[in-house]
Amino acid sequence: MKNMDFAAFIVESRKAIQAALLEGHEVSVVMGNEACDLDSAVAALTYAWFLFQFSRPGSRPVPMLNILRAELPLHPELGYLFKRLALPSIDYLPCQDDVQLKTLAKKGTLRLILVDHNILPLSDAELEQFVLEVIDHHRLERPQASRHSLSSRETVVYVEPVGSCCTLVAERILGLVPQASWMSLVPGNNHNEPQGRKQLSFNVAALLHATIVLDCVNLSPAAGKTTPKDRAVLETLEGLFPQLPSRSEIFEELLSIKSNIDGLSMEQLLHKDAKAVEVEGIRVELCTVYCTLETVLQRHGLEAELALHSETGSYNALILLTIVFHLKKTPQRGILLYTKDAALRTKLCLALENCRSPDLQLQIIRDLNGTNQYWVAYCQGTASASRKQLLPVVMDALADKASRGAIR
């Protein structure tokens, strides 16, 4: 089985999960975050493949897309890359509905590896004892010391604020696998790989490269996301594989697909790229929406749609983060905050308006003096402040609010 190539690994992933559930073998699930953006999905897939090269018999690493299978059409970037690289359909990849994490936990066969997030949502808190490793680029939220219950190993936590989680995955791969073992691999030649050698394919490098370029906005200084490590990893991959497409080419292709929201309902827009946080029972969802704030505000029945989404998901508040990328200009960002809880709305508004790390440079473009009493909208002047930077601001505000007992 160790001789299977990357394409076969993709095809066999769901079967491996089914076998683990039926036969009770140990399985290491590499799981991205609930937004399941390209960074999260590719980090999970490539790191699971890398671990597979070194796994012992009876222990199978598998990737998991942290969404329901029905939501796959809302994430077309991964499918596009798979087609571009002539890889099997993304339908072969396990999703939430395929991987019964709590069943595996009860069987005592689960090893959980988190990528692109470092703490589980409260709904999965019981799985915390099964977390063996963490690779992430967000603010560290998990306890400093934790252990995997089955092995008694201390959880390995690797968190660094780079532009893309795939940068950290690629760094791990490049650091542990001799670079010479990449050199003989070119597209279409995987079937000629020497048996038994722990190698990685061109396709793995291409997935990592494309994702880092997209996540770092093609290394745009105005976006402010790129770190020296992101740049160094890209240069290393490009040096190993000169066949990789140019950064501008792959960025423009992926950006066009990611930004296409034609035909999507508001509910689908909110589901497309969302992360929820919860502090002491206060639930807030932050949704990245790929259009201008004006486009959102002009939607007929907007408030009713936001109310329905809040009620369905049991969210105390919604924060829509709008963004439009201009290929040669600064990204344009906006924020819409919706909640029927006046105290929570005030707390969150103050947290955003008074934030200085980073300074969001907010300008209210429609306030509570208008006809829409439950939401506030802002034009955001700081183009580099994404959801990654806003999540800690929101969580700190919720923690402060909960500690004061202002929300019941």
Image: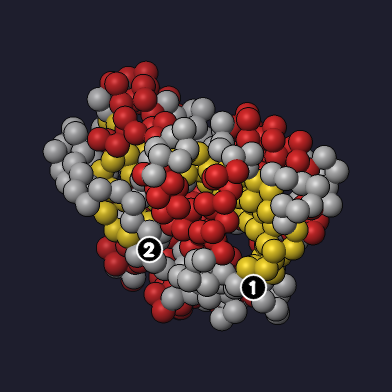
Task: Give the residue at x 65% y 58%.
Answer: 335
Q: Secondary structure at mark 2?
A: helix
Q: Is residue 394 visible?
A: yes
Dot 2 or dot 1: first in sequence order is 2
Residue 227, position in %: x, y?
44, 76
Q: Foreground residue, 252 or 292? A: 292
- In this rendering, the answer to whether 236 lies above or below 287 is below
Q: Which residue is mark 1?
A: 381
Say if mark 2 contacts mark 1, CB within 8 Å: no
Q: Which residue is mark 2?
A: 168
Please tell me in which quadrant of the rendered image residue 383 appears.
bottom right
Q: Foreground residue, 28 or 226? A: 226
Question: Residue 125, which numbered label?
Answer: none
| Residue farthest toward the left in the current orientation of the protein | 152
Please tell me in which quadrant of the rendered image residue 373 appears.
top right
Q: Tell me the colour scheme of the image.
A: secondary structure
Q: Is residue 29 left or right of residue 394?
A: left
